[in-house]
Image (cartoon, rainbow, N blue to C red):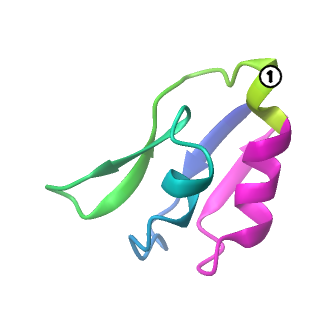
Amino acid sequence: MKVKITSQCMGDRNCNKLCPEVFEYDEDQLLSIVKFDEIPEKYEDVVRQAMRECGADAIEIIE
């Protein structure tokens, strides 16, 4: 699984709070970034949850 943060990101940091192992907040760009090219399997469920809970619909999952 791969994850992409789109330009719709509002920087509310929900994904960072939910899964700091995968998502990181970039203070310079004021948006979240993904720490991995391929998401480790143990984080896949929480990444899907972050996508569902993203208010800006800014998280895209590529299976």
In the rendered view, tell whether residue 50 sits above or below residue 43.
Answer: below
Q: Residue furthest front?
A: 17
Quadrant location, the C terminus: top right
Q: Give the range drawn in magenta.
A: 45-63
In the rendered view, tell whether residue 51 sits above or below residue 57.
Answer: above
Q: Is residue 56 left or right of residue 52?
A: left
Who's the residue at 46% across and 30% down the image? 35
Asked if the magenta segment contains residue 57, the reply would be yes
Residue picked out by circle 1: 42
Helix, strand or loop at mark 1: helix
- Residue 60 picture location, percent across and down: 69, 54
- Residue 54 picture location, percent across and down: 65, 71
- Residue 46 picture location, percent across and down: 77, 44
Q: Is residue 8 left or right of residue 18?
A: left
- Residue 52 picture location, percent across and down: 80, 67
Q: Which of 5 and 49 is in front in this view?
A: 49
**Amino acid type at image mark 1:** Lys
Residue 40 visible in rendering = yes
Quadrant location, the N terminus: top right
